[in-house]
Amino acid sequence: MALAQKKQNEILKAVLDIEAHLVKKYKISNEGTFGSKLKEAGPKIKNELVKDSMWQILKMRNAIVHPGNLNITSKEYELFISLFTYVKKIEKF
């Protein structure tokens, strides 16, 4: 598997982990897109930096799955890992 594909798969798996966390912790619907779940959980997420990080993660995910695939650079991947690690640590999942 190409490195870029591996990075994309890791990002998509991390997004699924965040979605599952949002549903469980904030008791929101499991229906809909990651964006709709994040919008529903938004008022319940008190830490604005965590909320902003989740939106950045969503933007990266959207760039991968929608037409015109983003080729993830090493810097973008490092940013994603940093954001995901931060969210995971603060949100405790």
Image (spheres, rainbow, N blue to C red):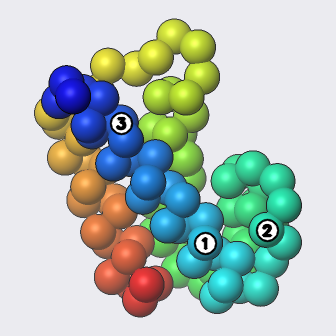
Is 5 situated above or below 14?
above
Please tell me which residue lies in front, 31 or 41.
Answer: 31
Which tag, 2 or 1, sits closer to the chain's start?
Answer: 1
Q: Amino acid at mark 3?
A: Gln
Which tag, 2 or 3, sits closer to the chain's start?
Answer: 3
Residue at 41% in and 89% down? 92
Residue at 68% in and 53% down? 34
8 left or right of 81 in image: right
Where's the N terminus, which quadrant? top left
> Which residue, given by chain and number where applicable, does mark 3 sit on?
8
Q: Amino acid at mark 1?
A: Ala
**Residue 56 seen:** no
10 Å crowding of disc 1: few (<14), some (14-19), many (20+): some
Query: In the image, residue 61 lies at what x, y percent?
Result: 50, 40
Please tell me which residue lies in front, 53 or 13.
Answer: 13
Query: In the image, residue 42 lies at what x, y percent?
Result: 71, 70
Which tag, 1 or 3, sits closer to the chain's start?
Answer: 3
> Which residue, given by chain and number where applicable, does mark 2 sit on?
30
Give the Cα separation between the discs numbered 2 and 1. 8 Å
Q: Residue furthest top?
A: 68
Is 72 situated above or below 90?
above
Residue at 43% in and 84% down? 93
Is 27 situated above or below 65?
below
Q: Secondary structure at mark 2?
A: loop
Give the Cα separation between the discs numbered 1 and 3. 19 Å
Query: In the image, residue 67 lies at what x, y percent?
Result: 58, 14
Give the Cα separation between the discs numbered 2 and 3. 23 Å
Q: Secondary structure at mark 3?
A: helix
Mark drawn on residue 57: none
> Which residue, given by chain and number where applicable, does mark 1 sit on?
20
